[in-house]
Amino acid sequence: MLLETNAVLREIDDDLLDQLVAVAVNDATADEVTPPLTPGDTWSTERIEWFVSYHRSCRAGLSGPSGESTWVIVSGGDCLGCVRLKRTSRAEVLEAGIWIRRAARRSGVGLSAMTALLDKARSAGATAVYAETTAENRASQSLLRSAGFTLTMPGGRDGSDGAVEAVMALDRSGRPR
């Protein structure tokens, strides 16, 4: 698959959701994109149903009951994953998340998608964006740093608790401060 590095974020309709499910099932373990609903990291009917239900519930957007929005990452006409923004206990701070299919990782699409997501956060009135990853997920850490986030390991410098937190303050233009 030849990838363009420019990502476009598209609202999730039923067609894009079907494409996203197919990409997830064929190019990710279930643990990468769903909670551990069933033993192991393989796809099950329960996990697929959760995935579909989750993305449908996010269609109402940040002001909806879930307080969350998701978008499909599209590049060169291909569905490559998704991004999300979620309300936090602080109205001006949104939590970000990203998942990209294996075949598209390390192509520049992630940075393009994160940049577009930060624009969405700014449009929603956010003054900061927060993300979490794990100490083992070096690719996610690299993407967040490249996008301008500041990373900390709340469990200590060695990341012994496995958590890595990333924060980016946005100025009024949506650019990192």
Image (cartoon, rainbow, N blue to C red):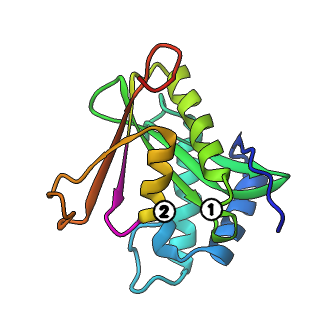
Magenta segment, which residues?
131-137
Front position in the image: 164 or 64:
164
Toward the top, the furthest residue is 172
Q: Quick check: 5 above or below 40?
A: above
Q: Which residue is mark 1?
A: 106
| Mark 1–mark 2 CB contact (< 8 Å) | yes
Q: Is residue 99 left or right of residue 95?
A: right
On the question of residue 97 being in view, the answer is no
Q: CA distance from mark 1 to mark 2?
A: 8 Å
Up/down of 20 relative to 48, above or below? above
Mark 2 lies on residue: 139
- Residue neighbourhood size for the residue with mark 1, other residues' Cα within 10 Å, grouped as few (<14), some (14–19), many (≥20): few
Q: Amino acid at mark 2?
A: Ala
Report x, y in % for residue 12.
Answer: 68, 46
Asked where in the image residue 115 lies, by quadrant, the reply is: top right
Q: Residue at x 23, y 54 (%)?
A: 153
